[in-house]
Amino acid sequence: MLNKLSDSIYYLSNQDDRERPTLGLVCGDRYSLIIDSGNSPQHAKEFLLEIEKINVPPVKYVVITHAHWDHFLGLNEIDATIIVNSQTSKMLKEWQRLSYDDRSLQKYGSTNKLSAMCIKIIQTEISNREGFTLKSPDVIFENTLTVDLGNKVCILEKIKSTHTDDSTIVFVPDENVLFLGDSAYGTTTNDLFHYKQSLLLPMIKDIQKYNAEMFLLGHESICDSNEMNIYWEEVTVASQVVKSPSLEEAMVSFKAEYKRDPNDNEVFFIKAFVNDHILHSQ
């Protein structure tokens, strides 16, 4: 079921047990725009069926926030202009070169090119896999792009991100709503979950300049500005005490700096920043 944020903004909540991120819908007087196409054709179909139940203008655009499979493998089901940034476009070309038959999927799994969950979703939710080819983008932008839906403007920007190098966010100015995709999260490299520490403050600056009041995230669905500010505070204080690949040093530094023990969220972030140092030291 679609969640209604306002008369012109809706979203389909994330389902982490099925590796399904939040999908967004912004409606103007003339057209509607979708944010992310889902993790499979089935996910996209279910989203489109929910959209059909409400009286909104036709979907003309779909924006992909970044080239992680759970955000774009539903693309072929959506008959709309596909918009991506130039880095996302390059990464999608890699997926267009893949084969999706069982033998190929087994090979990708054995070489860690695709995760086990990704392969399972592809096998169960994509029909005619042997002939499956991902659609190509129609509009490719470099840094920013403004889309007019008819008395409703969406601002797209490629930002710095702790999650990927190709993150696009979507801001709806008259509603002060910002779709973040997965941009504010960490990532996993060589089996280590980490936050890209050097990009944390630049990312926060890129996001906070919009002064948004509501935030749609890929795997939390929706947060208000107070919740996001708490998130920024916790992740920032954690980053400030991590100077080396030593978790013990970071924990001691935190207690000395803030005169308290870190809470559970802060411990999680500290470990992620320590992992970032470990990766850089390898």
Image (cartoon, rainbow, N blue to C red):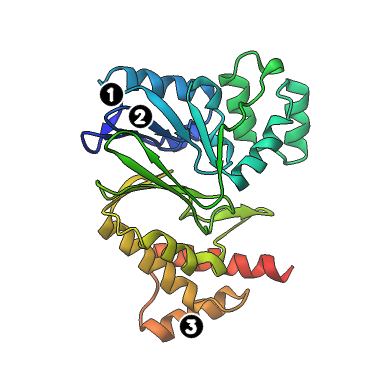
CB under 8 Å between discs 1 and 2: yes
Residue 186: mark in rendering:
none
Q: Nearer the viewer, residue 182 or 54?
A: 54
Question: Of all residues shown, which one is farthest toward the bottom?
Answer: 256
Residue 253: mark in rendering:
3
Q: Tell me if mark 1 has few (under 14), some (14-19) or many (20+) residues whose alpha carbon lies within 10 angstroms of its own.
A: some
First of labels 1, 3 by sequence position: 1
Q: Quadrant of the N terminus?
A: top left
Residue 56: mark in rendering:
1
Picture quadrant where residue 265 is located: bottom left
| Amino acid of disc 1 | Val
Q: Is residue 9 above or below residue 101?
A: below
First of labels 2, 3 by sequence position: 2
First of labels 1, 2 by sequence position: 2
Picture quadrant where residue 3 is located: top left
Picture quadrant where residue 60 is located: top left
Question: Of all residues shown, which one is farthest toward the left?
Answer: 7
Which residue is at a point 73% across and 20% down the rendered structure image?
Answer: 101
Q: Is residue 71 above or below residue 272?
A: above
Front disc: 2 or 3: 2
Q: Find numbered disc 3 in the image and state the secondary structure of the residue it sits on.
A: helix
Q: Is residue 23 above or below residue 272?
A: above
Which residue is at a point 63% across and 70% down the rendered structure image?
Answer: 277
Q: Find numbered disc 2 in the image and state the secondary structure of the residue it sits on.
A: strand
Mark 1 → mark 2, Cα distance in angstroms: 7 Å
| Amino acid of disc 2 | Ser
Q: Which residue is mark 2?
A: 32
